Image (cartoon, helix red, strand yellow):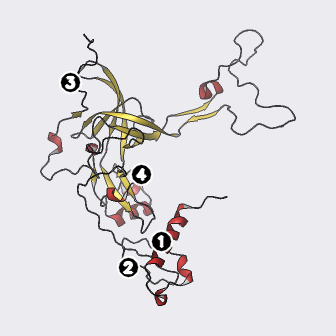
């Protein structure tokens, strides 16, 4: 059975909800109203096939204010630039290998709601770009939303209580040192590689009887039955340049003044590549410590005067021997 598109399901749910608000047979909707059209203006409502409004203006008022996060809440993620790797030493003298990520001017560039797009999501923009380096359709998208031109866009699904208005700024204080995050990026491209490097094959014999086939992949199939090479056979080919997610990455330190995040371990991608950071799915953070839906800085706060924040390592030295 073929999978049903998500958009068709959302349109069907909207149709059922509209039918439920009719109070009398005279107010019943025409049969053609099942084929609902979508307007792309900011104050769009649902319309039927004849173009008449079915539901009034569904404009949702979204305010940037602190709220209480529940266990089912899902916050947005942010976009960062990978700067490289280094090592730090914590207060107990342990060496911590870290990756440095730069959060370059993240803002909310679009809000998607169930009424228009059938999903709750936030589109986040990162960096800056000139109009001559963007297509006219992309420039029109930014101007319609009233936000500056951005170099990179990414959509993050969220829950309804985690929506933020367009233009809201997101910084490194969106995350708390000590929590775990999932980092997604594009791995380094390694070009066309052989079986030993790409799949970890052990290779052929290194001595007698293996002429010019020390690193070959060996046999790839049988004879007349089945007479073909099965799909998915591990062979030589292009390696890398794939989207990968590193899960449960520990946030060691943040610097609000420079918008930098230090995370323990490696993250996918080369220096200068974009990575996407969001709350960890498996090692979920303590919801009482996270700013929800994001950190909203006071008006009198000067980011340049803020000190870096390091994860709490406790007061007991883990390297002291028990008496």
The residue at the far front in this view is 323
Real-space Cα distance between discs 1 and 3? 55 Å
Q: Based on the displayed image, in which of its 4 quarters is residue 88 positioned?
A: top left
The residue tagged 4 is 154
**Residue 168 placed where, x, y %?**
27, 56
Q: Which residue is mark 3?
A: 315
Residue 39 location, quadrant: bottom left
**Image x and y of residue 234, in percent:** 67, 32
Mark pair 2, 4: CA separation: 30 Å
Q: Residue at x 21, y 40 (%)?
A: 257
* Structural crowding at the residue carrying mark 4, measured as other residues with C-alpha within 10 Å and reported as few (<14), some (14–19) or many (≥20): some
**Mark 3 vs mark 4, CA separation in Å:** 40 Å
Q: Earlier in the sequence, mark 1 or mark 3?
A: 1
Question: Where does the N terminus fall, quadrant-wise?
Answer: bottom right
Instruction: Choose the circle earlier in sequence order: 2 or 1.
Output: 1
* Label 2: few (<14), some (14–19) or many (≥20) C-alpha neighbours in 10 Å: few
Residue 56 bears which disc, if any? 2
Tag 1's secondary structure? Answer: helix
Residue indicated by mark 1: 14
Residue 80 lies, in percent from the top left, at 36, 42
Asked if marks 2 and 4 touch (Cβ < 8 Å), the reply is no
> Residue at 65% of width from left, 59% of height from top?
2
Whether residue 106 sits left or right of residue 31 in the image: it is left
């Amino acid at each position: 059975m073929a999978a049903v598109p998500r958009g068709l399901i959302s349109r069907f749910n909207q149709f059922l909800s509209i039918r439920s608000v009719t109070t009398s047979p005279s107010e019943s909707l025409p049969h053609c109203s099942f084929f609902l059209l979508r307007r792309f203006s900011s104050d769009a409502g649902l319309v039927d096939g004849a173009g008449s409004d079915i539901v009034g203006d569904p404009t949702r008022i979204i305010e940037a204010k602190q709220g209480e996060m529940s266990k089912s809440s899902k916050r947005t993620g942010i976009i960062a630039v990978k700067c490289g790797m280094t090592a730090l030493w914590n207060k107990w003298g342990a060496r911590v290998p870290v990756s440095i990520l730069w959060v370059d001017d993240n803002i909310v560039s679009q809000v998607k709601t169930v009424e228009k797009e059938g999903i709750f999501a936030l589109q986040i923009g990162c960096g800056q770009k000139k109009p001559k380096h963007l297509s006219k359709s992309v420039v029109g998208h930014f101007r319609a939303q009233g936000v500056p031109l951005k170099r990179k866009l990414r959509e993050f699904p969220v829950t309804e209580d985690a929506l933020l208005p367009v233009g809201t700024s997101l910084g490194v204080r969106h995350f708390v040192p000590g929590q775990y995050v999932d980092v997604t990026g594009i791995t380094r491209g390694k070009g066309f590689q052989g079986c030993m490097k790409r799949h970890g094959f052990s290779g052929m014999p290194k001595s007698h009887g293996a002429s010019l086939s020390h690193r070959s992949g060996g046999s790839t199939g049988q004879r007349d039955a089945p007479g073909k090479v099965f799909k998915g056979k591990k062979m030589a080919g292009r390696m890398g340049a794939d989207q990968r997610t590193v899960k449960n990455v520990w946030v060691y330190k943040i610097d609000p003044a420079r918008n930098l995040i230090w995370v323990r371990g490696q993250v996918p991608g080369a220096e200068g590549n974009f990575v996407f950071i969001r709350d960890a799915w498996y090692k979920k953070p303590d919801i009482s410590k996270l700013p929800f839906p994001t950190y909203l800085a006071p008006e009198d706060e000067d980011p340049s005067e803020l000190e870096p924040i390091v994860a709490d390592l406790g007061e007991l030295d883990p390297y002291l021997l028990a008496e």
